[in-house]
Image (spheres, grey):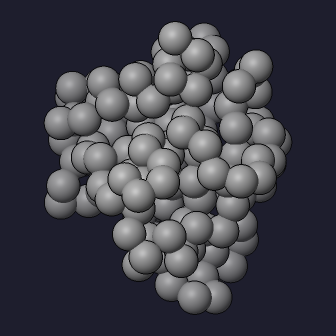
Amino acid sequence: MTAREGIVAAARGWIGTPYVHQASCRGAGADCLGLLRGVWREVLGAEPEAVPAYTADWSEAGGREDLLAAARRWLRPSEGVAAGQVLLFRMREGAVAKHLGIQAGTGAGASFVHAYAGHGVVESPLSEPWARRVVARFDFPLGV
């Protein structure tokens, strides 16, 4: 299994986990950041920094790109499209990046795994409405 396949397998292992804000416990609860944190622990080990408490509308009021800044600190910028990439999304034009997922399928069957309020951790098609919201792609800091 390649590193990218391992990342996708780890992310898919979280499917069915209920959505719980600020949680990161496979099977019990996770939000989108919690999913990424859990996959990080599975593929890399200990998390690189403590995550401060955050509200559902975090960073929006001040317009701070906290999620994007953290991704730049701990992940590697990536170009092109590949399974295992971390995708950052802006949910509205001009808004801060505040959602993320992990690319699972590519090509005609493009999909991503993410934790979504009201749905839990799911694998969704990377349809045009989602694809146009992607603002950055990152790789985990390992040999992928």
Report the number of numbered marks.
0
Residue at position x 37%, y 53% from top? Answer: 109
Give the farthest residue toward the bottom: 93
Q: Where in the figure is residue 71, as x and y percent of width and height?
A: 71, 47
Q: Where in the figure is residue 77, as x and y percent of width and height?
A: 80, 47
Q: In this view of the protein, can residue 137 be seen by the observer?
A: yes
Q: Is residue 107 left or right of residue 96?
A: left
Q: Is residue 59 left or right of residue 109?
A: right
From this view, report whether residue 132 is shown above or below residue 41: below
Position of the C terminus by quadrant: top right
Residue 76, by quadrant, is top right
Q: Where in the figure is residue 96, as x and y percent of width and height?
A: 63, 74
From this view, report whether residue 138 is shown above or below residue 11: below
Residue at position x 71%, y 71% from top? Answer: 64
Q: Where in the figure is residue 98, as x and y percent of width and height?
A: 54, 64
From this view, report whether residue 24 is shown above or below residue 94: above
Q: In this view of the protein, can residue 71 be seen by the observer?
A: no
From this view, report whether residue 39 is shown above or below residue 78: above
Residue at position x 70%, y 38% from top? Answer: 139
**Which one is in front, 38 or 78?**
78
